[in-house]
Image: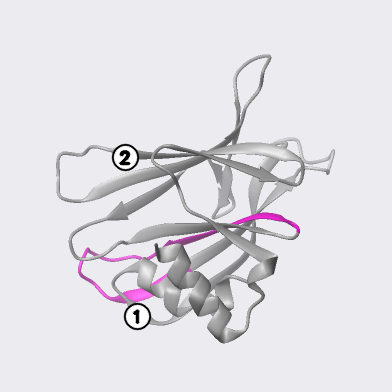
Amino acid sequence: MKAHLLGALLLAIGLPLHAQQFITPQRDITSISTNGMELQMLYTDIDRNTPHTLRAITFFRANDKGPAQQIPFEIKKRFVPALQLESGADCAISGFRAFKTKSGLRVVYAERDGMWADERRVNFTVLELKKNDDPETVDAPALAFREVGKVASKRNFCDVNEAMSAEAARLFK
């Protein structure tokens, strides 16, 4: 439902909706076709026995001949296997949006510092799915969500999801 609201917001501010398609995570595994590849997004809850929810988002590519190929995220110049999403009764302190563009797949990861009810600036990391075409880069995975931009919110927010909606014009283009 939030993706539909975000789509309406993008239409209102004049961004080309035909150029992007937001991906809403399904109950557990969401299949995604992009640039001739079939990917899966795994959306899981981690029970911490507290009122604060911890979720994880992982992308992978199935392999008929062996284990799946996990697709990591480049966050703060390190490759991490999953995005951790934390939310509580007051607000979410980390979140994400995934969408397909003409050129491929993009993820916006949002996080903020502070305690649960704090209002602070939200940091957005914009990532695009990219193949590693550089033979000199040995440590980089063959396929990863690579950082293509970072931006901070213009004002303070408690909930990062509200921040993503408010800053849609800068993030989802």
What is the basis of the colouring in this image? one colour
Q: Label 2 sits on what residue type?
A: Asp
Indicate whether residue 108 is drawn in magenta.
yes
Indicate the position of residue 153 as horizontal and vertical percent values: 45, 78
**Is residue 8 positioned above or below 160 on the image?**
below
Q: Which residue: 58% across, 70% down? A: 172
Which residue in the protein does label 2 denote? Answer: 45
Classify residue 84 as left or right of residue 151. left
Q: Does the magenta stretch include residue 3?
A: no
- Asked if 49 appears above or below 69 in the picture, the reply is below
Give the SS element for disc 1.
strand
Q: Where is residue 146 in the image (x, y as percent from the top left)?
A: 65, 52
Crowding at mark 1 (Cα within 10 Å: few <14, some 14-19, many 20+): some
- Circle 2 residues within 10 Å: few <14, some 14–19, many ≥20: few
Front residue of 159 and 62:
62
Q: Where is residue 114 in the image (x, y as percent from the top left)?
A: 28, 66
Tell me which label, 2 or 1, sits earlier in the chain: 2
Q: Which part of the image, by quadrant, shows the C terminus?
A: bottom right
Instruction: Name the amino acid, label 1.
Output: Asn
Residue located beneath label 1 in the image: 156
Q: Residue 63 carries which label?
A: none
In percent of the image, x 19 and y 65: which residue is there?
A: 90
Q: Which residue is drawn at 55% across and 77% down?
A: 10
In the picture, the quarter occupied by the N terminus is: bottom left
Q: What stretch is highlighted in magenta?
A: 103-123
Height in image: 112 above or below 132? below
Residue 173 falls left or right of residue 87: right
Identify the element where label 2 is drawn: strand
